[in-house]
Image: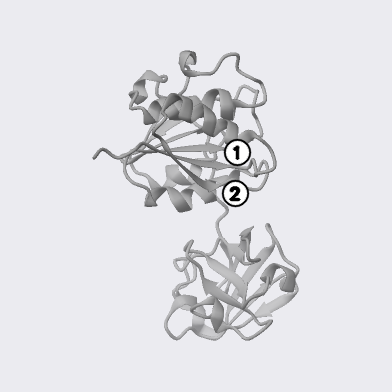
Amino acid sequence: MPQRPIITLTTDFGWNDHFVGTMKGVILDIVPDAEIVDISHAVQAFDVLDGALTIAQAYSYFPPATVHLVVVDPGVGTARRPILVSSERHHFVAPDNGVLSLIYAREERLHVRHITSEHYFLQPVSNTFHGRDIFAPCAAYLAKRVDSDKFGEEIIDFVRFQAPRPKPTDANTIRGVVLKVDRFGNLVTNITPQDVPALFQADPPAFKITVGKREITEIHPNYAGGAPNEVFAILGSMGYLEIAANRAAAAQLTSAGKGSEVNISLLGAAAAGQGQ
């Protein structure tokens, strides 16, 4: 039995308004057998980096030929371009504002097209809801197996950015930043095991992590490993170091949030082998 076409949705629209439901209606009118999967509609409003993190964490777990519709679009109605990105396994429809930057960094072979074939759009096109009038119908026709080259010409000047990277401040210290605060109040940093290998050893050396008003000296293998109200480090499922607490919001306990500075100091000679 043929697989139903799959379209995922990632937006900052939330659930209070009609936006998400309207896009689903547009998709189903064009491809009635589509399976629509909500990845998230809780991306921080206007936050292109948060959108980039969200889609980058989810897309690779979907079957081949999935179409990922990503609408975090503070420049809607301006000259920013709608684009279609095709990798070896997936398609992405999004505004050309960098929201697919982490996809570009992870995928070796990509084709990026400026969507200019307006006969796929709903008419008239609103200046404020391209998710409905441009992105949703294009995603639907793509899921309906319209060839990607029908949507527009390839471009190479698409917008991309580098996510913030941690930087060493001296031989024993690396400085990172909180990328996001998740639903449970965990602080997701931009620090990976490659940045501080010693911290993620089976028997890590003594260390100190400073974030907000707290100093952290313990790393645990899971969220339940900490004592009540203890703030600790953990390697989260996103592949980043997180600052967490057992059944509590680390963000509240540390008085830290997105953009907060995170400093890791490896004590003594432990910094040998620290990543750059």
Identified by mark 2, the residue type is Asp
The residue at 66%/21% (across/down) is 127
The residue at 37%/44% (across/down) is 107
Residue 125 position, x and y percent, is 60, 17
- How dense is the environment of label 1, judged by Cα within 10 Å: few (below 14), some, or many (20 and up)? many
In the image, residue 227 sits, relative to residue 176, either above or below, namely: below
- How dense is the environment of label 2, judged by Cα within 10 Å: few (below 14), some, or many (20 and up)? some
Q: Earlier in the sequence, mark 1 or mark 2?
A: 2
Q: Which mark is residue 114?
A: none
Give the left or right position of residue 68, taking residue 21 as reference: left
In the image, residue 200 sits, relative to residue 165, either above or below, namely: below
Observer able to see residue 144: yes
Residue at the spot of label 2: 50
Observer able to see residue 96: no
Q: 69 or 262, which is in the foreground?
A: 69
The Cα–Cα distance between marks 1 and 2, rounded to whole angstroms, is: 9 Å
Q: Which mark is residue 72?
A: 1
Give the left or right position of residue 207, taking residue 211 as reference: left
Identified by mark 1, the residue type is Val
What is the quadrant of residue 86 in the picture? Answer: top left
Q: Residue furthest left?
A: 1
Q: 200 or 37, which is in the foreground?
A: 37
Q: 221 or 40, which is in the foreground?
A: 40
Residue 150 position, x and y percent, is 37, 19
* 1 and 2 marks in contact (CB < 8 Å): yes
The residue at 46%/76% (across/down) is 200
Residue 235 position, x and y percent, is 50, 71
Residue 48 position, x and y percent, is 60, 42
Is disc 1 placed on a helix, strand or loop? loop
In the image, residue 236 sits, relative to residue 199, either above or below, namely: above
Is disc 2 placed on a helix, strand or loop? helix
